[in-house]
Amino acid sequence: MLTLSSFGKVGSVSVARSAAAKSTVTVKGIVTTNTELGPIIKYLQDDSAGIAIYSDSVKNYKAGDSIIVIGALNPYNGLPEVTAVTSTKLISSGNPVPAPIQLSFTNAFDFKYVGMLVQVTGATFSKTGSFAGNTNYKITDGTNTNDVRIVNSTDIVNAPIPSTKVDITGIMSIFSSTGTTSGFQLLPRSKKDFNYGLAPGFATALTQSNITKSSFDVSFTTLKKGDTKVYYGLTNKFELGSKSDTTQSLDHKVSLTGLTTATIYYVKGVTTATTGDSSESSVVLMATQSNSSGKMYACFDLKVDTSKANSASNKAVQSYYTLDDTIAAVMKRAKSTLDIAIYSFDSKNLSPSLTTAINLAVGRGVKVRIVADGSNGNAGLTGLSVSVKVVKSPTGLPYGIMHNKFIVADVGSEQGATVLAGSTNWTDNQLFTDANNMVIIQDQTLAKAYTLEFEEMFLNNKFGPDKTDNTPHLFNINGNLVEAYFSPSDGVTAKAVNTIKTADKEMEFAFNLITRSDITAAIKNQYYNSKIFVAGVVGDTGSGGGTQYLALKALSNKTVFLFTGKGIFHHKYFLVDANTPSSDPTVFTGSYNFSTAAESKNDENVLIIHNANMTNQYYQEWASRYKDNGGSAYFTQVEDQYNTSNKASVKYRINGNQIELLMEDNQSSNYQITMIDLNGRVISSNFYKSVSGTNLISLEGAELKNGLYIINLQSNTGFSQSIKVPVLR
């Protein structure tokens, strides 16, 4: 049994920090973090200093615990840290967590405060939008600039970046290969670490729902109660006015009506407390539904497995190495404008055909503009008409690469506006050898959003980290929810994680590469916690797939494989619940590799398409690639196992402004039925007594707006089920 005497002499944290590297130290202090900053790292503090403890042996300690730790001092990129822990002991629990040291902006970022809780006052963020995980953000006091790092495991991810001055509490940390003079970064632990004073403060960013051709709803939540006012207009002058609700609340929503079809609006939220203190959101762009056809097509250059088609009319397009013809066909249909963003246009066999297609478009009077990557030769650009203006991205840090591969045609036409996107570059290998995909969508609102992104590069010469989140993201395309995001301004990794979290039954992936541990962690969490089926293929980039591939393969050696075929496995997509129509089948695809460069430096684009047929078309392609690389275990819809005394089958339907559940029960039971949205807010919670046989249940108190809802059913006899219900009208 360990006793206090077993630990020998216990030194102060400051003494431990000054010890020689790799020497054994014994420290005692109060834990200041739970699992917000990671599952196996804790920060320990006493009156003298703070220090990090990195060990699986401290993962169960909580903030307020007084503990003793024996281990080796192993500084990590400048951070004083104890690892190789040999002993720990809990002295007491429930102690007050040390109050953060309140410091001015100029004094806080100092090595003596590293490892301690501090509060930095009067900080302003230089970026707008929403926070992404594992990302650094610049803050300033008007003169000095420092970093706040948002750790992926905090609830801050997806929260709005404060648009006004704020006091920030967090652990002062450091990440520097040069020692203790640079690389300081403040680590807030939760949304509660942002102090807006008496103002309400925004807990969530503005969200859009119930999108129609003439209206949409705007919602947000606040940390403290306030009223609601939403400004909107065709510019950031908000010339169309505002809609208000004087009710003091944490939950805020207004409906903007009388809007114009296929139009992008600038929207800003303002909330004021009874004290008169106000908070305002960043400006967000939102758009109405278009009158376009909304037709969607997926194209693949390798064979597809049409035996996996969900109907005879939904067989995926097998292009048989003719994706160049598909690209040329989109150009041929263009009548007025053609905007092209292409990473690599460099091919002896391909360049003449697409160069010719561009020149023929010019000859028809089409205005053609091109954005190309500055680090590529792009031989296909030679021979273009002199009227075609080409803008190339800058090279060298802080920029990455202009990695987009998209076309926007006829943005001004309701029935002609078209977006072509996907993973395919315009080279011989990419179209005739490598595994690739493209998606084509006829929708004017989506085309306008892609045009905004294009013109940020073409007209404003902004690339990589210089870009801002300046496009709408949610689209009602012929009754289908489609999301569009761009890197590095929009926090695409967080959007991928959020999509993975919606998987109820299965997830299939086709990754050219994956180096983001947060993506892997999200997949693993769904695998272990929700028991989903996970399978996929990862490209061999010369490193045997890398660490994240091995972590995924460890889930199941029978369902995760390394690509061994000809050429490059260039896909960047994954599928959620492709074979479960009631569970919002979704495809995530685009130019975005699951890497830090794609998240923080490269120009990329992503589409998240909530559509069963489109997801199934990608599933047909995936099934063929999976089989080619050794896969044989496919997802099978297995009946959920319930208590044998109460087995119920539940379906849903949308009836007017309500969701109805149709439940077959084999006995009378008492149910609690709770409906929540993706932010975890309870929309309704009711009790229902079933009868043996068929039960029709209308969810009382549920205000049905567009979005994705989760309905949880729990009976007194052991039955439980969760149902995802996508609503888009």
Image (cartoon, rainbow, N blue to C red):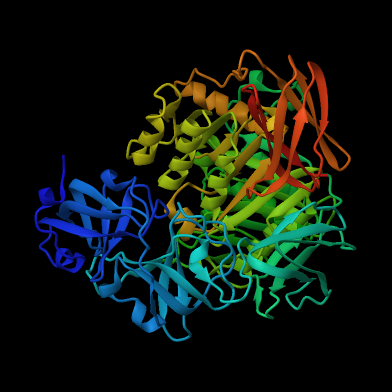
Counting from the top left corner in percent of width and height, residue 153 is at 45, 51
Left or right: 467, with 44 as reference point? right
Q: How many marks?
A: 0
Seen from the viewer's position, the closer of residues 391 and 495 is 495
Residue drawn at x 59%, y 58% is: 383
Counting from the top left corner in percent of width and height, residue 27 is at 19, 59
Task: Tell me if I can see residue 318 in this picture.
Answer: no
Counting from the top left corner in percent of width and height, residue 470 is at 65, 66
Residue drawn at x 48%, y 22% is: 628
Seen from the viewer's position, the closer of residues 618 and 154 is 154
Seen from the viewer's position, the closer of residues 122 and 174 is 122
Task: Tell me if I can see residue 141 in this picture.
Answer: yes
Left or right: 15, with 434 as reference point? left
Seen from the viewer's position, the closer of residues 522 and 324 is 522
Q: Relative to 319, is 32 above or below?
A: below
Quadrant of the rendering where the N terminus is positioned: top left
Q: Relative to 305, is 335 above or below?
A: below
Counting from the top left corner in percent of width and height, residue 405 is at 59, 51
Left or right: 74, with 473 as reference point? left
Residue drawn at x 71%, y 41% is: 675
Quadrant of the rendering where the C terminus is positioned: top right
Q: Relative to 466, is 133 above or below?
A: above
Left or right: 696, with 76 as reference point? right
